[in-house]
């Protein structure tokens, strides 16, 4: 395909390469499909509806981009975030695809020009925000255009049970009503059974097949540590293991975002805050720097992240517990989209459980919603407290079974925690909570157990109780671990009516009577291994070339940064890291050799081929 940087490509790519695999290779530079991509593309091209559940980085976008190129008309992509639309369109334009967006950032004249292109059949893909699509003007416009398909991205937003529920998504049921003969494909990286059911019901997909890919992200190492001094732990984690890497740090409050970003900067780590309370221009500038520059850390509330397409995020860290496993999986999934080794790290403590339970109890949601929310939180706490493979527990939540009992790439597999019989310790703690009236929090219970004659202990006469000092064999940190695990097991629970207080549950009776087994995990003696796991090595090497000449990689990155700056797009839109690694490894010196590198399609070969080959030759290729 010979096309200039700004000239439109021929009216339909399918006129040139009607075969899906040929389009995949010529446009996107990819040698083959992954997983169920080929089956999904074939189904949609034939006019079928479907629901696609595929992990972040698994290639969801190709499942609607390719059919849009192969079917007559324009593919309409419903996307919730301007940043996601902008980045995907920039990448498509680089590949020579006629793509555009309709959102609130456009002037009336710009929007009118795009609408005219749609009606003239001059677009392959059009990205539209749900609010925009539901307007009478937009629906009327779509009614006059030739539509290839509707793709509802981030489809979990349609569910009230989902972690990113957006009311405007409910209105998307109008698509099935007004365009019953146009294929609909709903896509998400995260959805439990309740969420899947609501997606199907809301979007009219009851009879449509579901394509559920593996949720496993073998290149991500999962690590959850006991929260002690979280800011110091975070700084050590980044400085020692991800210095100079791009990463995302999630905090629950805006104030904590600001404080954490400031602390990281003081420690020499370039960090930017992002939350809804910041001026819109500052938010946009910080997000653009994170996307466009290398090695920037963004510290954010959950207002940041959905749809972020940056492939080289090397770590995602949580300083506060998310609300559910879905939220945890979605947020950690923003690491390592390019398949290279990455880390999902979280500092977690008892205060996180208490805080999240209080937020649920104080919410205005219906009782059914609160019950579901508590169940989701309990599942996440169980993941944090498990002494077994975290990946196995995580995948099990989504109904998937790992072939092996150990993944070899989580902290519990790399440095297994000790597990001991904790029945006596549990009985002491529960007795202490009961005899002090179930009106006190963790610190007071620990003071009583250890035998500290604090002013508060003496004020309530708890130094006279039989439980005073019966737990002196453990220190404060150990007792905190016991309390946290008993809360996770459901034998203790925060009292919604007495802030911070812990009270016994029905299951505590069995523990006190000695009828219920209690096994407690202890912190492993050594620090988790920092070496790559065998499984991780296999997973990464399957999709990547071996490392190339560091000096050539540096030259390619510098060239990419300059091209990205000139074109006003993120560096990864020009070339992904994996493509740079492929060039540095194979050192192509001809156009044919360069064309065989994954990520080099016809358009990129035309645009950048000579410069890339010159860089290889200049480095001694």
Image (cartoon, rainbow, N blue to C red):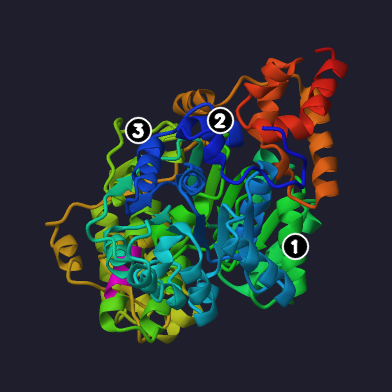
List the residue tagged with mark 3: 406
> How busy is the neighbourhood of tag 2: few (under 14 within 10 Å), some, or many (20 plus)?
many
Q: Nearer the viewer, mark 1 or mark 3?
A: 1
Q: Quadrant of residue 137?
A: bottom right
Residue sitting at x 27%, y 39%: 401
- Residue 59 in percent (x, y) is at 49, 42
- On screen, residue 169 above or below 261: below
In magenta stretch: residue 374: yes
- Above-or-below relation of 571 to 282: above
Give the residue at mark 2.
25
Q: Which residues are magenta?
A: 371-376
Q: Quadrant of the N terminus?
A: top right
The spot of residue 209 in percent (x, y) is: 26, 50
Tell me if residue 566 comes above or below residue 221 in the rendering.
below
Residue drawn 82% across and 41% down? 563
CA–CA distance in space, label 2 to label 1: 35 Å
Camera-nearest residue between 276 and 569 = 569
Q: Name the residue carrying label 1.
A: 286
């Amino acid at each position: 395909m010979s096309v200039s940087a700004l000239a439109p490509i021929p009216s339909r790519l399918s006129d040139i390469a009607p075969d899906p695999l040929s389009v995949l290779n010529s446009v996107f530079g990819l040698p083959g499909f992954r997983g169920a991509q080929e089956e999904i593309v074939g189904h949609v091209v034939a006019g079928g509806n479907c629901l696609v559940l595929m992990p972040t980085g698994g290639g969801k976008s190709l499942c609607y981009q390719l059919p849009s190129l192969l079917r007559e008309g324009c593919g309409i992509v419903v996307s919730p975030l301007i940043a996601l639309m902008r980045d995907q369109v920039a990448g498509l334009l680089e590949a020579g695809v006629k793509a555009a967006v309709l959102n609130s950032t456009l002037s009336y004249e710009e929007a009118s020009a795009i609408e005219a292109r749609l009606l003239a059949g001059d677009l392959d893909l059009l990205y539209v925000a749900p609010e925009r699509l539901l307007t009478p003007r937009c629906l009327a416009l779509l009614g006059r255009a030739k539509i290839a398909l509707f793709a509802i991205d981030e489809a979990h937003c349609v569910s009230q049970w989902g972690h990113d529920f957006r009311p405007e998504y409910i209105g998307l049921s109008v698509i099935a009503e007004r365009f019953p003969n146009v294929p609909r494909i709903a896509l998400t990286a995260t959805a439990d059974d309740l969420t899947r059911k609501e997606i199907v019901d809301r979007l009219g997909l009851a009879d449509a097949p579901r394509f559920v890919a593996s949720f496993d992200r073998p290149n991500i190492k999962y690590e959850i540590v006991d929260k002690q001094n979280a800011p110091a732990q975070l700084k050590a984690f980044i400085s020692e293991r991800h210095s100079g890497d791009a990463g995302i740090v999630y905090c629950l409050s805006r104030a904590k975002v600001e404080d954490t970003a400031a602390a990281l900067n003081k420690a020499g780590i370039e960090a930017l805050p992002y939350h809804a309370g910041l001026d819109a221009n500052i938010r946009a500038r910080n997000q653009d720097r994170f996307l466009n520059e290398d090695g920037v850390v963004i510290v954010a509330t959950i207002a940041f992240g959905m749809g972020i397409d940056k492939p080289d995020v090397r770590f995602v860290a949580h300083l506060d517990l998310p609300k559910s496993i879905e939220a945890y999986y979605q947020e950690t999934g923003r690491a390592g989209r390019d398949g290279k080794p990455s880390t999902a790290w979280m500092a977690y403590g008892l205060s996180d459980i208490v805080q999240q339970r209080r937020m649920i109890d104080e919410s205005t949601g219906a009782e059914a919603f609160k019950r579901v929310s508590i169940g989701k939180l309990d599942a996440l706490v169980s993941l944090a407290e498990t002494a077994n493979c975290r990946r196995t527990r995580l995948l099990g939540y989504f109904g998937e079974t790992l072939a092996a009992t150990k993944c070899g790439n989580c902290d519990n597999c790399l440095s297994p925690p000790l597990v001991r019989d904790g029945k006596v310790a549990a009985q002491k703690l529960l007795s202490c909570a009961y005899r002090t009236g179930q009106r006190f929090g963790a610190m007071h219970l620990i003071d009583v157990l250890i035998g500290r004659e604090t002013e508060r202990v003496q004020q309530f006469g708890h130094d006279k109780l039989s439980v005073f000092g019966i737990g002196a064999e453990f220190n404060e940190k150990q007792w905190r671990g016991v309390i946290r695990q008993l809360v996770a097991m459901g034998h203790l629970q925060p009292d919604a009516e007495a802030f911070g207080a812990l009270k016994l549950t029905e299951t505590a009776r069995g523990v006190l009577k000695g009828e219920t087994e209690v096994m407690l995990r202890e912190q492993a003696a050594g620090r988790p291994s920092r070496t790559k796991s065998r499984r991780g090595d296999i997973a990464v090497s399957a999709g990547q070339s071996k490392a190339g000449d560091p000096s050539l990689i540096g030259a390619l990155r510098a060239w990419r940064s300059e091209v990205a700056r000139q074109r006003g797009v993120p560096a990864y839109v020009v070339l992904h890291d994996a493509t740079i690694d492929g060039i540095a490894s194979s050192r192509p010196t001809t156009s044919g050799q360069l064309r065989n590198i994954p990520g080099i399609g016809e358009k990129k070969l035309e645009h950048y081929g000579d410069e890339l080959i010159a860089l290889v030759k200049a480095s001694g290729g």
